[in-house]
Image (cartoon, rainbow, N blue to C red):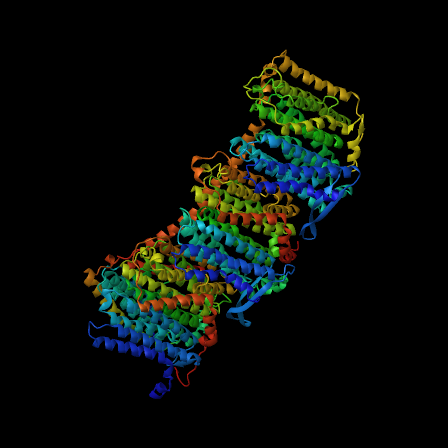
Amino acid sequence: MLQMSWLIPLFPLLSFILLVVFRKSSNENTAWIGVLLTGASFVLSFGAWLAVWQGDGIKVEGTWFQLGERAITMGYEVNPLNALMLVIVSLVSLLVHLYSKGYMHGDERFSVFFAYLGLFSFAMLGLVLSPNLLQLYMFWELVGLGSFLLIGFYYFKPEAKAAAKKAFVMTRIGDVGLFIGMVLLFWQVGSFEYDEIFSAIKNGELSQSMLTLTAICIFVGAIGKSGQLPLHTWLPDAMEGPTPVSALIHAATMVAAGVYLVAAMYPLFQASETALTVVAVVGGVTAIFAASIGLMQKDIKRVLAYSTVSQLGYMMLALGASGYVAGIFHLTTHAFFKALLFLAAGSVIHAVHTQNIEEMGGLWKKLNITGPLFLIGALAISGIPLLSGFFSKDEILMSTYADGKYGLFWIAVIAAFMTAFYMFRLFFLVFTGKPRGSQKGVHESPSVMTLPMIVLGVLAVVAGYLNTPWFGTFLTDYLSQGPVELLHADHHGPVWIPFVATAVALLGIGLAYMIYQKGSVSRDWLTRTFPGLSHVIYNKWFVDEGYDRTVVKGTTGLSWLGVWFDKYVIEGLVAGVVSGVQALSRLGSEMQNGQVQSYGTFAIFGLVLLLLIAALSGGYFS
Amino acid sequence: MSTWLLSILIFSPMLGVLVLAFVPSHDEKSIKWLGILGTLFPLGTALITLSAFDMSSDKLQLAETYRWISYEVFQSKGEVSYPIFYEVGVNGLSMVLILLTAVVSVLAAVASFSIKKNWKSYFILFFLLEMGMLGVFAAQNLFLFFIFFEITLIPMFFLIGRWGYVEREKAAYSFLIYNGVGSAILLIAFVSMFMKTGTMNFEKLTETFSLPQEELNAVFITDGYMMGMLIALLIAFAVKLPVVPLHSWMVSVHVQAPPAIVMIHSGILLKIGAYGLITFGAGMFPEEFRSLAFVIGLFGVINLLYGAFLALTQTDVKRVLAYSSVSHMGIVLIGLAALNEAGITGAVFQVVSHGLISALLFFLVGALYERAGTSELNDLGGLAKRMPILAGVLLAGGLASLGLPGMSGFISEFMAFLGLFEKMPILAAVGTLGLILTAVYVLRAVLAITFGTEKEQHETYTDLTSAERVPAFVLLAAIMFIGIYPAWLSDMLRPALDVILLGLGG
Amino acid sequence: MDLDTLLSYKWGVMAPEFIILGVATLLSVLDLFMKKEASRKPLAWLAGAGIIAALVSVFLQLDQEVTSILYDTYRLDFFSKAFKILLLLGTLLVIVLASSYKKEEIDENRGEFYYLLLAALLGAMMMASSADMITLFVGLELLSLSSYIMAGLERRNKRSNEAAFKYVVSGGIATAITLFGMSYVFGLTGETNLFLIVQNMQDEELLKHGFLLVFAFFITFVGLTFKIAAAPLHMWAPDVYEGAPVPVTAFLSVVSKTAGFVILIRFIIITFISAPAAPNIDGEVMLLQVQPYVMALAAVTMVIGNVTALRQRNIKRMFAYSSIAQAGYLLVPFVSNSSLLFELIWFYLLAYLFMNIGAFTIIQLLTTQAGSNDISVFRGLFKRSPWLALPMTLFLLSLAGIPVTAGFVGKFGIFMGALGLEPAHYWLAAVMMLTTLISYVYYFNVIAVMFFRDDEGRKISVPGGMATVLAFCAASTLILGVMPGLALDFFYGNFDINEFFMRIEEVGTHTH
Amino acid sequence: MSSVPLTAYLMLALILFCIGLFGALTKRNAVIVLISIELMLNAVNINLVAFAKYSLNPGLTGQVFSLFTITVAAAEAAVGLAILIALYRNRQTVNVDEMDTMKR
């Protein structure tokens, strides 16, 4: 099975090529091409995962091109970490393909959408399979391309255009960090191979400062891709894309690639305490920051988007706090419950044709499958015991505490409270209460859409049992076959942590219930109490505006400066030379005044001048 | 056959001139097709040359040498003869560029269908231009190189001045004078080297200049002289490349020349500058080149950033692409400044890659201009609806231009930066800012054209015709081929570049 | 000197001059006896035949040893042969132009035209073959006086008159300056024979008069540059070129200029080659000492010619400035003292002959048919008469020094001269290159007018003779551009540069 | 007879030359301009003859030279006057200032 794993990304690629060829086909059965081929990928991935579970692994490489003495290689590798990722990616991709069959029904570029999904899946699976940094980087960018194309799928919408561009550019900023880190590592180690990099680190071939520098550079790449502070602003805007895209790319897979990157390069990070701290701090701050914005958003998808940013922050925090397993674990569970939430949100939007939660309400009955599934997702993300989110989040808190990062621990706890609050704010506003907008013709989505949600719903519940203190730490055992030395493999933090986590989650749910369901606390209580703060939060901490006023304005200003320089200085110099020559020319023809005697005078004058200069400078009379 | 192969290749476009001379100028249809056929013949010959080319050898291949001119000079040591030969030959580098020339010429000939008048003289000039370009890359001595270099100027002057847009004559003069400055400096440097060494042959010159300094001093070749020559060459080719601040001619040519000619200009002519820098600069004066590496790298980064910053706010897509060319040529300099395998390979890759990419983009802009009558970004938008293929290929071209992996642009940028990071990491890190800016301006321009709401007047526009799809797809395929399988190119280049690197000691 | 001595000279070596002299005399007599209204075409044929005969006889002399008769007042050496070929070839082509020059004003003097041309040619040839100041001067004046008259040949044309008058006055002043300088050369050495002058230059006594020698050099040099139209005695050229009939302009710009270089090289190089430097400047010969100044003159000439040409709308005036600039270029090898001097100047003048006469052929065709000298006569020429536009383009490219034309090879050679010796004259080469760039603007302006402007003008009819000249010049310009070896190998194969300095002692003569 | 030094002759010639030059460059009457040029040529003759007699290397050729100069000067004057007459016929003036139809 493992020998065939190179086929995993190629199936979606084939799907992309076929669908581009058939892009004009109005027959929506083209979707099945995508579904079947992604399904094939999933089967292979699952097979690979099973093989790895049994302690197998594979790494195949060949020379891509020769750079002097060094061969730059390409190939594929299956190890515990990426086998898990393969399953997650191909599974979510398969489910989203299926879901989209219903969601995108009737769109005039139906086949193109599936083609793009295929392209993205290809890139994402390729990223995961990469055995070296260069190949990872290449797919890293291609994943960005897929994301870009899908965000801009509704190309005629100006918002989509802007969002697509923003996503590409913001992630590119991060990518450049990754690029620098990668290239620096290459000149230190002489290879892009993970294995060689890790063994070089182990042998102490790199100085501490170089380790920190490269690790942080690579982490910058992860920041960009995973929407961490300060490069998070593209992710909420990316919600302009069709909802299945948000589920696949901007919740479950691509944005998790940053976390995956840090995990894949974990030995590098482990070697530098500073880098780990940076990761943890960025993750923790992002977690609470994004959660705070999520509190006040009105767009259902944006709330989920900020929630994603926040949860990704959690994962980073885990990794930064040496909670390698915890990070991966949360990545896995988050992929399922967040994809579920997005698909459910998509189902809601599909039904009511709006994304504004103020215009929803009371949909529980009408959407009798979507509703409960959404609730499962919401409970899972809030960290209610027995659901997947509880176990993974618990693990994160535990490792943060065990790592001695108490400040970040409390931040994470507060973020968990906020998470529970805004998720249930969402739930109550959408599904309970009275309809606030017109809900004519609202009906449950077709089974092709609900089926994937149900699958994800199940996974959102059971995925947590991969790694529990109670039933066994399968994931930990599994991951410890990989190249990463697990430091806090079984950290048993204080027993009170799960209780605290559960308590804040319930508190959050309770508060949401009080405000949005029962109305016992006024909805504008927060706004009234802290008008300044809530204004800032409502406007997303003015980060976008801040960037606009500094970076964007600055760049544009520099550009105008350059245009000015080009036009007036450079071309001015040229014009100066030209007019100088012209002036000389005019002088020449002025002298040519038609008077033969003045010609003679000039000649004699010239001769005398010549003689004079010769006499004075020649040294004849000295 | 094979002894004459290269000469046949160089002069193969003349066959087209001969045939066209006998076609009446009103028979437009035959002229158009003969125009394309006339470029296919050089392409065929180039492919035969490629098959005769031994990729593993680092020797000059298919060389031809004939005595041409000889000057007899009386000096104190007796009569010395200064012979000039007709010497042509190819190494991996020139082979690649010849191939690029042949391919881009065919596609530009196809793109020339949008030319409106005087087909016959257009194609005759076009063939002369192609001959000049092939000759530049095949020449093995300075004299021949210079002659072909200048031969490219004259047809270009006419092609811009007669078939260009509104301000065509100004652009033609600007082209002529700037390039004239470059070739003026070049000629002085070439003649000076000739008079000092008595030879114009590349290999012999390289040998001479690598002699021990005591021997060189005897023939008045001092350190300062060599440095002066290198600087002269750098300036001359900086005009061609172009390097900021000598770039303004190139922008006006990009904007004013007919698209098919810009394909040639941006695709190949600019590359003569890079070719010259590599062959003469790094090849003949390695030590001096090494000591100037930082300056070259600095200019590379300035070019990269300057071009990118200016491209950000241009409102005409042609100007965006023009400044993008400035920016991308900076990468060539960056690669060269690195003086290592990665950097120089990256520079050459960038030469080829940018040749293909800019040919593609200008082809598309030409097709767009023909339909819309404008290339102002504000007047365009939403074209993805009526012209999905054009929009798609334009987007693909734009992505290639911003260095998306899987496309040739990535490989070249990657290698150039990889190279520079070894030698000057800080400069390189500053340069990577350009990668971000490139993404910004490329997407800005491409999305402004293809995305957004469609304007009313666009409703009549048609997508690329099947004749137009050929160049677009061929170029795109070539770009992706190099992006996915760079070894094909790097293997061909390596022997030639290794020779240069050996000289550089890197 | 007795009759025996006189008869002992190998008069045969003067065959070319005798042929020209004979034909010129014959033409003047025939012209007198011909009816006034009779066509003068036969005279042109005769003149042409005479020149061809002279050309043949020069070629027959190619193997001839260096010969000197009449105490070096007549010398046959490589130099005289090489440059006589240019002079004869140039005049031959001008004769064709002259015979096709259709203008009423000139018809009554057409006979004079031909034999004055021959007389001027004779003067030029004498200069090429002389090594004595007196004969050099007489040759120069023969050329000048004939040229003055030719410039005014359109008697009823005010411009032609004015041109002639300006030419006479400028020429007179220049002659006086030259002679003044020559008188000092004579005074310092006591000889008029160039080789004897050189001998006497070695005199220790002379060193005391270092400045006087330099003074004499500059005055003579500047006076002689009148013929080649170099600064500062260049200002006559635009006016005279404009006013004179086109064939005469062609003659002045080509043959007369060649003759100017002939006398310049002959006189300056032989006379001053070993002149001592001024006493307090050691280790140098005078020619090196004055080099910077002459270079400056060359540079000024290039700048003035090219820069002023930019503003010209009159095509003949533009070519006048262009010809000033070309004189500047030609001074570069002259002043750089390279041993390539002879072949470089010779080749450039050969190339210049073809490109300039070719260009003037077309100018003559266009200006006479349009009755205007304005540059607009070229409008849309490519559409109207592509077979005129293409050769004109070739000539202009050649004048601008673009490769694959003879002009480029010529310029390349000039650079070799300028950069060949230590120290290399980079700045002079740079000035030359920069001014060449400026020249692109006006040369290409003509091209742009021909190709980029449209005009509904008539097709131009080309007489057979002109077409032949045109084809010949165009082919030669191209062939010399592609295979300059043809000319250079001819030069190296037949000429030995050492002959130039070879003094032939005549037995038992010349005693004081 | 050698009481008059060579320098005196040379000075005389130089002064004569300058007078001629001044006349040629400033006089409005074209005839006088031509005559002034003759004056310059005659200055040269004085030089030549003086040098022939008194220079470091006296030689007869100087006098021969001056004979040629005189002849040539005569011819030049003749041609000059002929051209002037043609000009006068067309323009009815001998004023040099007015002869500037061609310029710039």
Q: Residue furthest top?
A: A520
- Give the answer, above or below, for where A518 lies relative to B294: above
A45 shown above or below A421: below
Number of callouts: 0
Residue A382: name its quadrant. top right
Residue B434 image offset from top left, x and y in percent = 57, 41
Q: Is residue A300 left or right of residue C262?
A: right
Q: Residue at x 30, y 74 (%)?
A: C45
Report the side of B142 relative to C460 (left or right): right
- B396 vs C480, left or right, is right
Is A480 or B38 nearer to us in this picture? B38
Image quadrant of residue A153? top right
Q: Horizontal and vertical percent for residue B177?
A: 44, 53
Residue depicted at x 66% and y 55%: B505
Instruction: Determine which quarter of the picture holds residue A470.
Output: top right
Q: Position of residue A574 (x, y in %)?
A: 44, 47
Locate residue A207, reporting x and y percent: 73, 41
Work out whether residue A611 can be spotted: no
Quadrant housing the N terminus of chain C:
bottom left
Q: Is residue C236 visible?
A: yes
Q: Nearer the viewer, residue C55 or A362?
A: A362
| Quarter of the image that includes the C terminus of chain C | bottom left
Q: Nearer the viewer, residue D46 or A354?
A: A354
